[in-house]
Image (cartoon, rainbow, N blue to C red):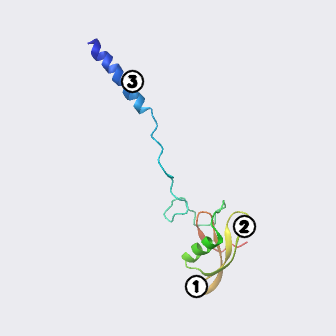
Amino acid sequence: MRKFALLGVVVAFATSGALGQTPPAQNGPQNRPINSSDSPNRQAGAPVAGHNSFTETEATARIEKQGFTNVSGLQKDDSGVWRGHAMKGGQQVDVSLDYQGNVTQGGVK
């Protein structure tokens, strides 16, 4: 009987040590990209201030992908938002692109 009790204690200690370990780190980022079109964190209502890593060429391409043409005058403001002008529906409009990849019409400062 003592052998079974001792065996039970050993098994309990052995399994509790395995349960207390953290899983190994996974390769690559585990978060979804913020500028993904399916990201729930996107705020499409207004340009969001933040560090913007898009180049002017990338910003132009993203704006054009949203149906704008003749993108011009793009400049990054103090909030990290690309702002400029473009054509849509035959009219010149103001456009902006934030660090999340949100393209909004209007609001050029």
Marks 2/3: CA distance?
60 Å
**Residue at the location (41% across, 32% down)?**
19
Indicate the position of residue 15 as horizontal and vertical percent values: 37, 28
Q: Amino acid at mark 1?
A: Gly
Q: Which residue is mark 2?
A: 77
Residue positioned 55% across, 60% down in the render: 34
Task: State the SS at label 2.
Answer: loop
Residue picked out by circle 1: 89
Q: Residue 84: image x %, image y %?
A: 68, 75
Tag 2: residue type? Answer: Asp
Position of 8 with respect to 78 (left or right) is left
Q: Is residue 13 above or below residue 60?
A: above
Q: Is residue 17 left or right of residue 66?
A: left
Q: Quadrant of residue 104?
A: bottom right
- Residue under label 3, please give it: 13
Q: Position of residue 8 (x, y in %)?
A: 32, 20
Split into 4 quadrants, where in the image is the C terminus? bottom right
Identify the amino acid type marked 3: Phe
